[in-house]
Image (cartoon, rainbow, N blue to C red):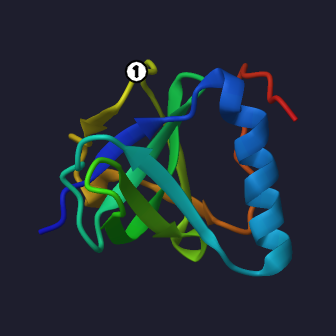
Amino acid sequence: MPTDIIVTTPKRCRKQAAREAEQIKEWGSGYYYRDYTQQPPVKRGSRVYYVEAGYVKGFAEVVRVDCSDGHRYRMLMNAATWQWIVPIPMRGFQGWRYMKIAQQDVVIIGDWQDPMPAVQGEVMVA
């Protein structure tokens, strides 16, 4: 069974991440990726959930993990697998964490072509 993890989108990177997501929508396909110096415990089919602004808001599925130079690992996720979920409160952190909520308990509310759902009381940054 694939291991699911949680990663963060740092505040300083949110606008860039939003622009990249919009570009992928325009292209009609693409990949998201994350780089790490240590191999994360994921494999094809694992979910990578994202924390942003205090909430886990969605996930994408890993299609491949590469190690190009022996020191940096890249998780590739097909953008078309992105799913928005009912936001789960969580503080940000560095690196990655194991997702401790079972997949069947995560409520999907949209896909990669839908806009990010707003969280009540949250001010969205464009």
Residue 52 lies, with reference to residue 93, above or below; the image says below
Count of all numbered marks drawn on residues in the image:
1
Residue 105 lies, with reference to residue 82, above or below; the image says above
User: Residue 109, image x and y in percent?
Assistant: 58, 59
User: Residue 88, image x and y in percent?
Assistant: 45, 34
Mark 1 element type: loop
- Work out which residue is located at the far bottom of the displayed protein and give it: 28
Q: Amino acid at mark 1?
A: Phe
* Quadrant where the image shows the N terminus: bottom left
Label 1 packing within 10 angstroms: few (<14), some (14-19), many (20+): some
User: Residue 54, image x and y in percent?
Assistant: 53, 22
- Work out which residue is located at the far left of the displayed protein and give it: 1
Q: Is residue 119 visible?
A: no
Q: Which residue bears the numbered disc 1?
A: 93
Return the residue nearer the eye: 35 or 48. 35
Residue found at x 24% / y 48%: 40
Residue found at x 26% / y 55%: 70
Q: Is residue 32 visible?
A: yes
Residue found at x 33% / y 57%: 69
Return the residue nearer the eye: 44 or 112. 44
Residue found at x 28% / y 58%: 103
* Quadrant where the image shows the C terminus: top right
Residue 75: quadrant of the picture: bottom left
Return the residue nearer the eye: 90 or 66. 66
Residue 94 lies, with reference to residue 8, above or below; the image says above
User: Residue 93, image x and y in percent?
Assistant: 40, 21
Residue 8 lies, with reference to residue 22, above or below; the image says above
* Horizontal arrangement in the rendering, residue 90 relative to residue 58 (left or right): left
